[in-house]
Amino acid sequence: MTITRFAPAPTGRLHVGNIRTALHNWMLARKAGGKFLLRIDDTDAARSKEEYVDAIHEDLAWLGMQPDMVERQSLRLERYDAAFDVLKAAGRIYPAYETSQELELKRKVLLGRGLPPIYDRGALKLTDEERAAKEADGIQPHWRFKLDHDEPIVWEDGVRGTAKFDPAQLSDPVIRRADGSWLYMLPSTVDDVEMGVTQVLRGEDHVSNTAVQIQMFTALYAAQFSAASGAPNELPEFAHEALLVGREGKLSKRLGSLGCDAFRERGIEPEALIALLARLGTSLSVEPIANMKDLLETFDLSTFGRAPAKFDDADLERVNTAIVHQMEFAEVKDRLPEGMGEDAWHAVRPNLETVGGAHDYWRIVTGPVDLPEFSDEDRAYLADAASTLQWGDDPWAALTSALKEKTGRKGKALFLPLRQALTGMNHGPDMGELLPVLGEEVARRRLERASN
Ligand code: GLU
């Protein structure tokens, strides 16, 4: 059974980058008939907020990407303690006593010599007496995971192909602070093990974390840590997608603040965001596909490129407009103005950029409409139109062909005064569709009023 997960920290609203990662994980699970797990990474008690947890749920619901399971790291602290004990007993976790200033100095020295700032494992070189002396001085250690330097870390990345790291080129990661609180690395691995996650798909900023975490997985399996949970002792598949960047090609601040609420306010449909994000950065073309089944059919990690995916608002708006043009009345009726029916929706839909735009067009129907200054000639023409108007199957076609015959007008001279008199606008919805929505009485009244 495929199990994917989306693991946001509730320290802010989801932004378009997170939404994309969530979507791809959701799609991987849906396509495989598996499960999509939402894991709230809330070990950072100071920065995590309940309002953001709620917002994550709301945003996923708006996007139609409800999780099959929800977990919270703050409720699993004893599992992390258990993993800590097991790995410590196995010699894979060690205490370190450097202050952040000392660590910073070490980094600077290495960088100054043109060397990579890899932790020198100073804490491993301490004698028992030195360690005892530190503790006697009241220095509480923080804790590091000891990487095994013997073999390269290799995996087949679902997007990047073969990935290879020399563990000696990585610092032993700090996994736990002196106050006992957790950093991201180990809890995430413990969860992936115990929740039986089979595919880890995340941003490429996590590539080196994966290298480290693969050793954590292996160490936990070796210690039989997951035996009780029944999860298979098998590494998940890893895939790292290229980052999302702004149109300018940079990681922009603006992207980081673009969330579901901002999209919703602008009239962006979740289907549009999904259609765009499902294919952005892949070899497939972005199309206004509103049907998830169709998107799922072509969804495949092998189409993902390694170049940054460019997010452009203009693309989103284009896809959104095309999606709005496909939306059925039943899908939108709760968001339409009071009284606006299916015929009216069909009449105005091709002119809309957003569903909300229907309100502006509905004003054409409810009136009053602002009339331009008509020439005497046009007024006479409109008077003619008012008396010619006959209600039937297609009153617009009947009216315009009768007027054409009668007056010899054609093109703009034939149509524009009618449109202006009936709608107060120079452009707008197809009159053949709109006229029946206005109804005979309103149409006649407007033509008469304009002819006076
Ligand atoms: N909370 C982590 C993040 O948002 C999760 C990363 C992961 O997918 O493992 O970056």
Image: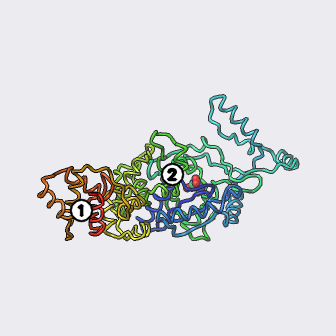
Q: Secondary structure at mark 2?
A: helix
Q: Which residue is mark 2?
A: 17
Q: Which disc, if any, is residue 39?
A: none
Whole-number angstrom distance, CA of label 1 to CA of label 2? 44 Å
Residue 421, image x, y percentages: 29, 57
Residue 449, image x, y percentages: 30, 60
Badge 1 amino acid: Gly
> Relative to residue 106, is residue 284 depicted above or below?
below
Q: Residues within 10 Å of mark 2 (few under 14, many from 20)?
A: many
Q: Which residue is mark 1?
A: 432
Disc 1 within 8 angstroms of ligand 1 (CB): no
Residue 379 appears in the picture as rendered: yes
> Relative to residue 282, is residue 83 depicted above or below?
below
Left or right position of 56 against 1: right
Quadrant where the C terminus is found in the figure: bottom left
Residue 170, image x, y percentages: 61, 43
* The one of 182 and 309 positioned closer to us in this rendering: 309
